[in-house]
Amino acid sequence: MAWLFCVLENQSLYPLFELHFHPSHKGVHCKMPCETAPDYTNRRLPGAPELDLLTLDGLDPRVDVDRQKLTLQFCKVCGITLASEKDTWTLPLA
């Protein structure tokens, strides 16, 4: 999972985008607060609209290389520019 937040004037965080990966039943999808009534300030996006994302088949978040590929996809979808692909950093899964 990955999140993109913006900082509001009062320094609260507002979620703009969540990336999820559930290989057993949903695959890669994202959540966005578009056209929703709830106030998501300082929280994630429960109940927000979901969109399926097209990705390479067979990516497994338990594999380091695949997590890096998912990170790159998240950055691309969110318009985040990296100096190089070596700038990706993901936490190892325990």
Image: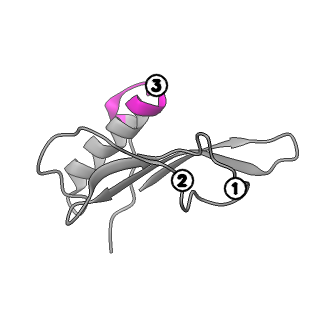
Q: CA distance from mark 3 to mark 1?
A: 30 Å
Q: Is residue 85 left or right of residue 5?
A: left
Q: Is residue 40 left or right of residue 54?
A: right
Q: Which residues are magenta?
A: 76-86
Q: Nearer the viewer, mark 3 or mark 2?
A: 2
Q: Nearer the viewer, mark 3 or mark 1?
A: 1
> What residue is pinned by disc 1?
38
> Within the image, what quadrant is residue 33 found in?
top right
At x 22% / y 64%, what residue is drawn? 25
Q: Does 28 appear above or below 34?
A: below
Q: Amino acid at mark 2?
A: Ala
> What residue is pinned by disc 2?
48
> Which residue appears farthest toward the right when viewing the image?
10
Indicate the quadrant containing the N terminus: top left, top right, bottom left or bottom right: bottom left
- Labelled pair 1, 2 in contact (Cβ < 8 Å): yes
Question: In the image, which disc is placed on residue 49?
Answer: none
Q: Residues within 10 Å of mark 3 (few under 14, many from 20)?
A: few
Q: Is residue 9 left or right of residue 93?
A: right
Specify which label sits upstream in the sequence, 1 or 2.
1
At x 33% / y 32%, what residue is drawn? 85
Q: Amino acid at mark 1?
A: Pro
> What residue is pinned by disc 3?
81
Secondary structure under the numbered disc 2 in the rendered image = loop
Q: Amino acid at mark 3?
A: Thr
Instruction: Residue 65: give x, y in percent of width and height.
Output: 21, 49
At x 59% / y 59%, what residue is drawn? 44
> Within the image, what quadrant is residue 74 found in?
top left
